[in-house]
């Protein structure tokens, strides 16, 4: 049995992911404790199922939002609660089973050894990954490299990562972006801007077909427009910070 960590927790945002979230929580719980889930206004009965699971395990905690606010908003809600409870780092992972529970301990150990860093998942895709998603993320990765002057973000969109809670909360509390699918990329970039260096670890990612219980709430048009606007404002933000960031990059090279 793992000894509960009082600094690092697992944080899983979930919205209408069906039975996959229960499987994800069980697998994560075998690797680490505590495990927190933020149910983002789900209407599929998973809130009640997760609450039943938590009643039998004090290291599982379920938080809930009254209606769907978006992935970033759900993560922020969990981060604020975790910070209040004294935790310093949170590993985020998707509720739909895409991310590898077997890599949790490696990511947590790396974060514990380097608490000043953000530990980012570098996805390794198999044949289940939609080609359009795999190739489309290359643009976001290129933009993230530009926006950070090559600080070392291996993958801007992978949601399997360990964040230092305090700086990320402070960043999100100062502005209203990063509340939906723009969360992952913008969090990594803005943390780099604030001096939190990225470390990259490989993580196999699996996509499940609908008949396997796979659920995706990504809308290609709506969310690609959201991501495009995100990169526009990040590039504008880079221009404002360019002297400071360039000086920092020169010192670190």
Image (cartoon, rainbow, N blue to C red):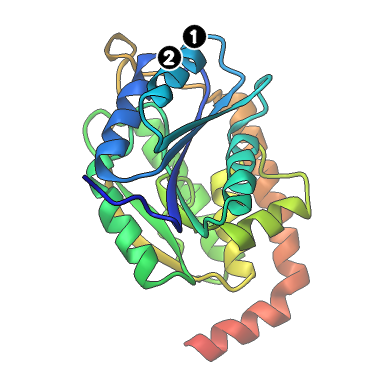
Q: Which SS class for mark 1?
A: loop
| Label 2 residue SS | helix
**Residue 14: mark in rendering:** none
Residue 158 falls in which quadrant of the image? top left
Nearer the observer, 206 or 10: 10
> Residue 130, position in %: x, y?
34, 29
Instruction: Name the residue that disc number 1 marks.
Output: 45
The answer to whether residue 98 is seen in the rendering is yes
- Determine whether 156 is above or below 71 in the image: below
Q: Nearer the viewer, mark 1 or mark 2?
A: 2
Tag 1 near tag 2, CB within 8 Å: yes
Picture coordinates of residue 48, whole percent (x, y): 49, 13
Q: Where is residue 192 in the image (x, y as percent from the top left)?
A: 57, 67
Dividing the picture into quadrants, the one containing residue 42 is top right
In-front residue for pair 81/111: 81
Please name whichever residue, 26 or 168, is drawn nearer the observer in this view of the structure.
26
Up the image or down, 123 lies above or below 210; here it is below
Which of the 4 quarters of the picture holds residue 165? bottom right
Please give left or right for residue 74 compared with residue 162 in the image: right
On screen, residue 66 above or below 60: above
In the shown orientation, is residue 133 left or right of residue 28? Answer: right
**Residue 201: in sight, yes or no?**
no
Q: Residue at x 49, y 9 (%)?
A: 45
Q: Distance between the residues labelled 1 and 2?
A: 7 Å
Q: In which quarter of the image is the N terminus?
A: top left
Quickly name the residue at label 2. Answer: 49
Q: Where is residue 38 in the image (x, y as percent from the top left)?
A: 54, 31
Left or right: 6 as drawn, with respect to 123: right
How many residues crowd around disc 2 within 10 Å: few (fewer than 14), some, or many (20 or more)? some
């Amino acid at each position: 049995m793992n000894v509960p960590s009082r600094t690092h927790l697992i944080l899983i945002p979930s919205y209408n992911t069906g039975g996959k979230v229960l499987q994800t929580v069980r697998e994560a719980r075998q690797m680490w404790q505590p495990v927190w889930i933020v149910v983002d206004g789900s209407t599929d009965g998973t809130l009640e199922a997760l609450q039943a699971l938590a009643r039998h395990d004090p290291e599982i905690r379920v938080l809930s939002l009254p209606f769907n606010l978006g992935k970033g908003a759900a993560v922020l809600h969990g981060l604020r609660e975790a910070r209040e409870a004294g935790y310093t780092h949170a590993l985020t992972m998707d509720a739909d089973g895409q991310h590898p529970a077997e890599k949790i301990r490696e990511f947590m150990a790396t974060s514990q050894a380097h608490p000043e860093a953000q530990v980012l998942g570098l996805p390794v895709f198999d044949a289940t990954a939609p080609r359009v998603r795999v190739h489309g993320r290359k643009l976001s990765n290129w933009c993230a490299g530009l926006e950070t002057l090559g600080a070392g973000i291996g993958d801007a969109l992978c949601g399997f990562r360990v964040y230092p809670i305090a700086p990320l909360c402070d960043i999100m509390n100062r502005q209203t972006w990063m509340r939906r699918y723009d969360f992952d990329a913008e969090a990594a970039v803005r943390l780099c801007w604030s001096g939190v260096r990225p470390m990259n670890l490989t993580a196999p990612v699996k996509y499940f077909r609908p008949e396997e219980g796979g659920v995706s709430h990504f809308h290609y048009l709506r969310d690609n427009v959201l991501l495009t606007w995100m990169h526009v404002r990040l590039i504008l933000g880079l221009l404002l910070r360019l002297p400071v960031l360039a000086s920092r990059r020169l010192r670190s090279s």
